[in-house]
Image (cartoon, rainbow, N blue to C red):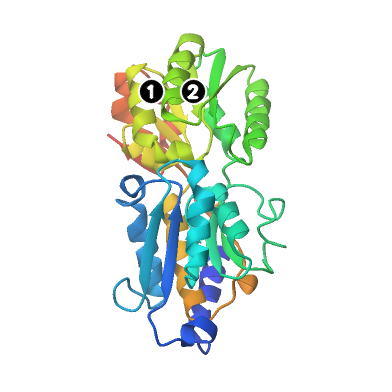
């Protein structure tokens, strides 16, 4: 119900008189900033974003220009890319790379409207003043990345009941790294599991980390992180190479051959971002568009083919909860 109200409010803004940038005769420009790559985002997520824009009356090449900039998994490039979009004076910045892209965009400009994703509390991070009335130039979608870590541990324990040590792959460069580590330790402790913390922020470290996880743990939980999503094909391949039961944070990992995932519906988030972007182009102010919270869109996906390869039996208790089952 809340989701319908939020999207209706955003769509309703389209009926308001077009003011500010939207009054300009030139075609408005959207800067699309992602920590990921075109290959990782394009197939399933960009269509969802464009669908949202379309519902708001905008189409790329028809009445809006979109400039895509990709960090290709490099946190170091985000500040410069966000700064370049700000210097170009685009009409809206879409920070589609998680919390780190949102923070980089917010730091780059206090004026240009920003629509983005936040994987942690946006008030605590300084992105908005409140969820319901953001108050500044940022709005978008809050994803429950941290809150769903405990559920991922529980799912992995059901799949690997004799596991005593669980590895947790984290990126120490992420803004909310300590929050997810704390949530992971608490969830593992409740299940009587020991946590082996492994870290990676580049491709070589990823390869070493998954090799270490296989040597000392019965399964692996991947922290919700934009860099890991940008490298999801590599991570899935490494987990398969090491025959390591792994639980992920987005369905896209499972579609690429991963075992199981639990987390926000990323395509739905991109759709909502598209709707909000269109509303702002039509004259709405991000300060008055409530942050959408994806409490209604946590989803479970299972790849039975991967489970068979790993010689794991997927319990009925998991199958009946699953939103997506890949045979």
Q: Residue 151, percent across and down?
A: 56, 34
The answer to whether residue 93 is visible is yes
- Helix, strand or loop under label 2: strand
**Residue 302 falls left or right of residue 86:** left
Front residue (pair 88, 252): 88
Identify whether 113 is placed above or below 268: below
**Residue 69 falls left or right of residue 295:** left
The residue where tag 1 is placed is 239
Front residue (pair 296, 136): 136
**Residue 80 falls left or right of residue 133:** left
State which tag comes first along the sequence, 1 or 2: 2
Residue under the image location 59 percent in, 39 percent down = 174
Residue under the image location 39 percent in, 70 percent down = 53
Q: Residue 96, percent across and down?
A: 47, 55
Q: Quadrant of the N terminus?
A: bottom right
The answer to whether residue 317 is visible is no
Residue under the image location 49 percent in, 75 percent down = 279
Instruction: In the rendered structure, find residue 220 and report the number of the disc placed on it.
Output: 2
Front residue (pair 76, 299): 76
For this orientation, the residue located farthest to the bottom is 17
Q: Quadrant of the C terminus?
A: top left
The residues bearing labels 1 and 2 have C-alpha atoms spaced at a distance of 9 Å
Identify whether 233 is placed above or below 72: above
- Helix, strand or loop under label 1: helix
Q: Residue 309, percent across and down?
A: 29, 20
Front residue (pair 141, 32): 32
Q: Are marks 1 and 2 in contact (CB under 8 Å)?
A: yes
Residue under the image location 43 percent in, 15 percent down = 211
**Label 1 crowd (10 A; few <14 / some 14-19 / many >=20):** many
**Label 2 crowd (10 A; few <14 / some 14-19 / many >=20):** many
Identify whether 182 is placed above or below 140: above
Q: Residue 122, percent across and down?
A: 66, 54
């Amino acid at each position: 119900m809340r989701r319908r109200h939020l999207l209706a409010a955003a769509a309703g803004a389209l009926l308001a008189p077009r003011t500010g940038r939207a009054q300009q005769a030139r075609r408005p420009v959207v800067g699309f900033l992602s920590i990921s790559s075109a290959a990782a985002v394009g197939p399933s997520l960009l269509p969802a974003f464009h669908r949202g824009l379309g519902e708001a009356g905008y189409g790329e090449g028809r009445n809006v220009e979109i400039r895509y900039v990709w960090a290709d998994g490099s946190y170091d490039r985000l500040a410069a890319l966000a700064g370049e979009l700000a210097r170009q004076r685009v009409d809206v910045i879409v920070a589609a790379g998680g919390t780190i892209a949102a923070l980089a965009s917010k730091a780059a400009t206090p004026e240009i409207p920003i629509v983005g994703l936040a994987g942690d509390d946006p008030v605590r991070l300084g992105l908005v003043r409140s969820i319901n009335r953001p108050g500044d130039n940022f709005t978008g979608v809050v994803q429950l990345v941290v809150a769903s870590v405990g559920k991922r541990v529980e799912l992995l324990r059901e799949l690997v009941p004799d596991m005593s040590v669980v590895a947790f792959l984290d990126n120490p460069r992420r803004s909310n790294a300590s929050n997810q580590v704390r949530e992971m330790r608490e969830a593992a402790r409740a299940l009587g599991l020991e946590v082996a913390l492994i870290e990676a922020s580049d491709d070589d470290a990823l390869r070493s980390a998954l090799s270490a996880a296989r040597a000392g743990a019965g399964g692996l939980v991947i922290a919700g992180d934009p860099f890991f999503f940008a490298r999801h094909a590599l991570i899935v391949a490494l987990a398969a190479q090491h025959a390591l039961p792994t639980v992920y944070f987005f369905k896209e990992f499972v579609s690429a051959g991963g075992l199981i995932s639990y987390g926000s519906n990323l395509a739905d988030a991109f759709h909502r971002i598209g709707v909000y972007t269109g509303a702002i182009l039509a004259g709405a102010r991000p300060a008055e568009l409530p942050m959408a919270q994806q409490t209604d869109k946590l989803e479970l996906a299972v790849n039975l083919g991967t489970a068979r390869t790993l010689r794991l039996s997927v319990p009925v208790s998991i199958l009946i909860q699953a939103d997506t089952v890949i045979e």
